[in-house]
Image (spheres, rainbow, N blue to C red):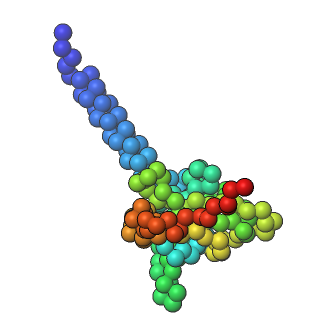
């Protein structure tokens, strides 16, 4: 017995609405958009000498918990530092004035994010303030290159065969 008429149309319509709703939820979850939920933003700035692969919309985390995102990245035309604007949720507006910021990577080749480490200062950062203590991104490729091609280590061929570099031994008694 086949379903005909309005019940078939209703079933197809309900299925399509369910599919569209699930696609919308997936799109929102994958882009971390809040659509105005969670209150206003609290804006801080941080200056870094090297930002690596950090991009706008990257997460800002405290203790591994996302509390905001990178809103903007600009280049200071005088000092040639990167000025990163952080948009944090307003419920985290009481960060101590000695909070530090670092650029880290999730996993070995994962996305870059800003990690904040709150200090113990009783004064708090106000919206628009700059985080003074920053740690730049570590360029993994540059570190590997320095290690491989630095020549800083000794090899077996560096010592001469006469033993001139060997430590002196004390005479036996």
Q: Looking at the image, which is closer to me, 2 or 123?
A: 123
Q: Residue placed at 50% from the left, 65% from the top?
A: 163
Quadrant of the rendered image containing residue 160: bottom left
- Residue 165 horizontal side relative to residue 31, left or right: right
- Residue 90 horizontal side relative to residue 34, left or right: right
- Is any part of residue 146 visible from this angle? no
x%, y% of residue 85?
A: 54, 71
- Is any part of residue 126 visible from this angle? yes
Q: Residue furthest front?
A: 173
Q: Quadrant of the C terminus?
A: bottom right
Q: Residue placed at 23% from the left, 23% from the top?
A: 8
Q: Residue furthest right?
A: 122
Q: Looking at the image, which is closer to me, 155 or 98?
A: 155
x%, y% of residue 159?
A: 45, 67
Q: Looking at the image, which is closer to me, 53 or 86?
A: 53
Q: Looking at the image, which is closer to me, 28 or 52?
A: 52
x%, y% of residue 95?
A: 70, 62
Q: Quadrant of the N terminus?
A: top left
Quadrant of the rendered image containing residue 169: bottom right
Q: Residue furthest top?
A: 1
Q: Residue placed at 58% from the left, 59% from the top?
A: 115
x%, y% of residue 20?
A: 33, 40
Q: Residue placed at 56% from the left, 76% from the top?
A: 47
Q: Residue furthest bottom?
A: 78
């Amino acid at each position: 017995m086949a379903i005909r008429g309005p019940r078939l149309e209703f079933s197809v319509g309900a299925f399509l609405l369910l599919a569209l709703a699930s696609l919308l939820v997936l799109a929102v979850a994958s882009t971390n958009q809040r659509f105005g939920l969670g209150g206003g933003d609290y804006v801080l700035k941080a200056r870094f000498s090297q930002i690596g692969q950090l991009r706008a919309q990257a997460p800002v985390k405290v203790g591994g918990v996302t509390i905001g995102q990178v809103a903007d990245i600009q280049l200071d035309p005088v000092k040639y530092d990167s000025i990163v604007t952080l948009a944090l949720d307003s419920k985290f507006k009481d960060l101590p004035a000695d909070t530090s910021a670092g650029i880290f990577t999730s996993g070995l080749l994962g996305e870059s994010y800003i990690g904040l480490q709150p200090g113990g200062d009783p004064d708090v950062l106000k919206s628009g303030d700059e985080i003074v203590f920053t740690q730049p991104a570590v360029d993994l490729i540059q570190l590997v290159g320095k290690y491989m091609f630095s020549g800083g280590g000794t090899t077996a061929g560096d010592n001469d065969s006469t033993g001139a570099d060997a430590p002196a031994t004390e005479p036996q008694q």
